[in-house]
Image (cartoon, rainbow, N blue to C red):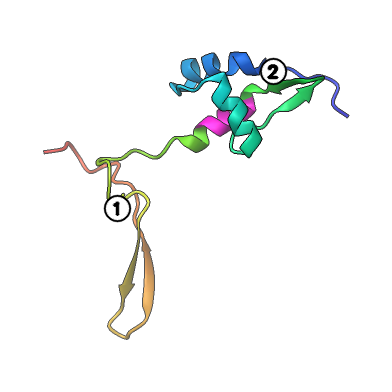
Amino acid sequence: MITNISGRRRQAVPGYLLQRWGIHVTSATIANLAVTGDGPVYRLVGKYAVYADEDLDSWAQSRITSPRRKASGDHTDEAVLRDTNSDGNSETLQLEPADNAGPAP
């Protein structure tokens, strides 16, 4: 049984997402996403949708990609390479981010 519900009403969600995550979204978009099931998790309190900060943070993080160097094409931070050994067996190579690659030229 839930004894305490705290959160933000839908009209306050855009301000929170903009301030905390830099995500520009309107309350109408949040309402539309609630219809399609693509928005943040919410609870109904009476007839009002209420969004917990934790649920908004989780949704925002799911919309933010890893760092990228170019706008299109393959992204090395997401790429999985397949390599065929000399014996004909295929092995999967997982690329890791180049954290220590040094300064860019």
In this rendering, the count of numbered labels is 2
Q: Is residue 63 visible?
A: yes
Q: Main secondary structure of the magenta part?
A: helix
Q: Nearer the viewer, residue 92 or 14?
A: 14
Q: Amino acid at mark 2?
A: Gly
Q: Is residue 14 above or below residue 32?
A: above
Say which residue label 1 marks. 74
Residue at 34% of width from left, 48% of height from top? 77
Residue at 47% of width from left, 23% of height from top? 21
Q: Residues within 10 Å of mark 2 (few under 14, many from 20)?
A: some
Residue at 57% of width from left, 20% of height from top? 27
Q: Nearer the viewer, residue 73 or 33?
A: 33
Q: Is residue 40 visible?
A: no
Q: Is residue 55 magenta?
A: yes
Residue 35 falls in which quadrant of the image?
Answer: top right
SS for tag 2?
loop
Q: Would residue 64 be found to the left or right of residue 85 on screen?
A: right
Q: Would residue 47 be found to the left or right of residue 81 on screen?
A: right
Residue 103 image position (x, y, % from top left): 17, 36
